[in-house]
Image: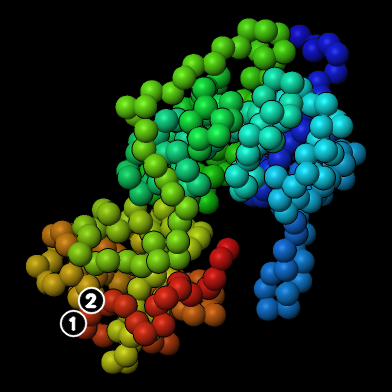
Amino acid sequence: MTPTPTPRLVFLGSPPFAVRCFEHLCTTLYRPLLLVTQPDKEQGRGRKVAANPLADVATAHGVERLECPDAAAPEFLDKLRALDPDWILVVSFGQILRKAFLALPKHGVLNVHASLLPRWRGASPIAAAIRAGDAITGLTIQRVVPKLDAGPVCARQELSIPAHITTGELQDLLAAEAGPLLESTLDELYAGRATFVEQDPAGVTLAPKIAKSDGRIDWEQSAEEIDRQVRAMTPWPGASTGLPIREALTEVRVLRGAPSPVTSAAEPGMVIGAEECGIDIACGSARAYRITELQVVNGKGMGVGAFLRGRRVEVGSRAGATTSSSAPPGGKT
């Protein structure tokens, strides 16, 4: 059904999660009047401003783009008010939206959230689902209210979480579904068929913002818990530990691994094997954890076979924290 009059929409988002959703809407009846993003930031050693893929999509589809450092700024609110939007769409924008902002559009502010609310309210729902070992996650479209991720829900879509998937990979799967789900939801809203259902407070779990320290591997955990941690922390901040190399601990980032077929009664953190197939480290469970791909500080990721050709990992020594372990190697990706 073609909405009449033409929908007046504003889109707020940040890469990478919002890119495919915004791109999809730009090819439909719901092309936004305005794209709002966070200001571009300098990155890397050269402090160059990185290209914003959302801005590229906006340019390709003739959508005005506005950089917004503060969504509560009066001049920004005046700009949106002048557009007289029906709805404001928010996908991974990264700023707290105050009451004055929420009151701007005629019908409200919609948010695409990467979990099945009320499970995993907060900034890191995808990583939280993986680390908890959830079998199912999905997308929720909610009306934004002042309380974080607590608004009534008008659409949901479930997705089974594949085994061995990382946060980055699961984010890509969910991002591919977000645009079509938002389009169909807008169809229902403009046709007057959509309903909003309040969230069940008994089902609330929280997914707070991830800190770099969340990537530190505690070898007292079971191999299964470490596996979920490694996948949840990939690509950022990365799961890290110190490996005993030539009688000293060297900080590494674990890129890939899995519970090992090897069992051991050794103390957690003890290296019990270092071969082409992987580095086995004893855990708080009978099964060891096997590292199969890793990265040293300022180095490239590589398989364990290539890693061991130039280094000797001391079997019988312990992995653990290093003096430089305040942040994982490699930086944010």
66 sits left or right of 324 in the view: right
Examine the rendering and report whether any part of residue 138 can be seen: no
With 322 as the anchor, is 234 left or right in this view?
right
User: Residue 193, relative to residue 142: is it above or below?
Assistant: above
- Image point (24%, 70%), residue name: 281
Quadrant of the drawing holding the C terminus: bottom right
Which numbered marker is on residue 271?
A: 2
Q: Position of residue 240 (x, y in %)?
A: 39, 70
Q: Where does residue 138 sit, x and y in percent of width and height? A: 48, 32
Please give the name of the residue rendered at 63% of the width and 39% of the height, measured from the top-left corner.
98
Residue most extreme to the left:
265
Q: CA distance from mark 2 to mark 1?
A: 5 Å
In this image, 67 relative to 189: left or right?
right
Q: Are marks 2 and 1 in contact (CB under 8 Å)?
A: yes
Image quarter for residue 155?
top right
Q: Which residue is mark 1?
A: 316
Q: In the rendered view of the protein, which quadrant contains the N terminus?
A: top right
